[in-house]
Image (tube, coloured by chain):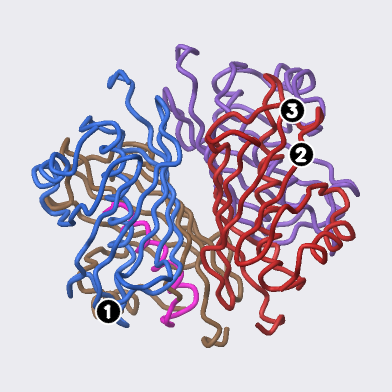
Chain colours: A purple, B brown, C blue, D red
Amino acid sequence: MADKQALEQFFRDEFPQANFSIEAVGDRHAQIRKQIGFEHLRPGGTVSGPLLMEVADAALYVAILGEIGLVAMAVTPNLNINFLSKPAADRDILANCSLLKVGKTQIVGEVTIYSEGKTEPVVHAVATYAIPLSEGR
Amino acid sequence: MADKQALEQFFRDEFPQANFSIEAVGDRHAQIRKQIGFEHLRPGGTVSGPLLMEVADAALYVAILGEIGLVAMAVTPNLNINFLSKPAADRDILANCSLLKVGKTQIVGEVTIYSEGKTEPVVHAVATYAIPLSEGR
Amino acid sequence: MADKQALEQFFRDEFPQANFSIEAVGDRHAQIRKQIGFEHLRPGGTVSGPLLMEVADAALYVAILGEIGLVAMAVTPNLNINFLSKPAADRDILANCSLLKVGKTQIVGEVTIYSEGKTEPVVHAVATYAIPLSEGR
Amino acid sequence: MADKQALEQFFRDEFPQANFSIEAVGDRHAQIRKQIGFEHLRPGGTVSGPLLMEVADAALYVAILGEIGLVAMAVTPNLNINFLSKPAADRDILANCSLLKVGKTQIVGEVTIYSEGKTEPVVHAVATYAIPLSEGR
């Protein structure tokens, strides 16, 4: 397990470009926040799809590392993502992740992304990760 | 909208082989129950994967018809299903469905399946349905 | 590896209810055929969605066992399925499977299903399987 | 329909940050190339997952616009992506897209991504797009 502070340090060191904040982590859950800037917008004032995928991926990564610790992780997931509604261009994005299964060799989690203050979800994603066995879990 | 009684009648008439019961429906949710019999088991005492897919599909169908009424529905969904743990051979299966989005032309829902009395989910699925426009919604 | 004859015996013994024929298997591919009967049809003269899922699942299973031999397999895949067009009610169904990756612990395959003699695909599916390590591959 | 030149102009105008080249487009297919730079790499010398998702998304977008013309497109797809092997850090990435279905209201396509000169696929993705009806197709 890794706490919020250790995770923030980890992402600052290893993924300096990720640039999100961890709102909460623990107990098979995580919430991260991403500030939306001009560079994330697409024609029509919507947030780019790949940016939303990146946020979904990051929220899963935080929840998993919060659960199993700062081990090297398999970078070979399956990700299934549904774009549900248009995100607001002028609000932060919040991603809530819950792990559905934490097995010895496989972890499955789901993420729901919202524009802050809105109740309609923007994105829902489910991902499956394989844990390398050398980690000896 | 369609209530539990109308839906049970509909499935008895249209899908006599479906053979599940509706425990609850309404407010973008549904719960259905499927009794597991010998014909649903696979070597090793597990419930067959296709049967679990059928139950996931049925739970989504009930939740959607409960929401939009007994209209003809597009039979062209995307379904993404994760098998999370081995179901019990000797327990009923309960499937809980929540609709994530109910749009004019698209509905997205998720389903979690459990063996009755267990807390570990057996299956998680997400599906996307297109609503035919002739339905005038 | 397992040849067509060994696989047909395996499915007759272990899954007597499966009831499909193996047209071809080997070299990371498989083709299976399923005869459509009255019991597989749904209102409107279409083939039931769960039956199509079952055929997709079976084609993957045949391709994988054809590649790695008749070992016990992880029953915990991820399956993502798209229903593309309405299958013919009066034609056999052919499912073509190709394995995209055959790794030590993970296999990924895709399946395309057709009504015999038609060129428009009915179903496309992608699945990920975990191989149990006790198999010592 | 839109040809390669019109598409390149479109992406330069509308998505100046996309920064890929169109190798081929037409007949329900597209191939795009993405040069990998230092900013796309992750610890361990691998290409970032979100970058690969962005390339998959772009290849689909090119194939679809090549087919239906430069219309406004629904930004609400379902995307299912499998990461199959580690991409090379020092090679361009090539993404090949084929459309599986081009319907009036729905398009389904698949993409396979390779590191240039390698035969093992890096990523496989399938996506479903809804076409807005106001486009009058």
Which quarter of the figure has residue D46? top right
Identify residue for label 1. Answer: B14
Which quarter of the figure has residue D71? bottom right
Which element is circle 3 on?
strand
Q: Chain of mark 1?
A: B
Which residue is at a point 24% across and 78% down the rendered structure image? C90
Q: Is residue B20 left or right of residue C86?
A: left
Q: Is residue B109 left or right of residue B53?
A: right
Which quarter of the figure has residue B108? bottom right
Magenta part of the protein: which range? B50-73
Identified by mark 1, the residue type is Glu
Q: Real-space Cα distance between discs 1 and 2?
A: 47 Å
Q: Chain of mark 3?
A: D
Which element is circle 2 on?
strand
Closer to viewer: mark 3 or mark 1: 3
Q: Position of residue C16 (x, y in %)?
A: 10, 50
Q: Real-space Cα distance between discs 3 and 1?
A: 54 Å
> Does residue A101 show up magenta in the picture?
no
Identify residue for label 2. Answer: A33
Q: Quadrant of the N terminus of chain D?
A: bottom right
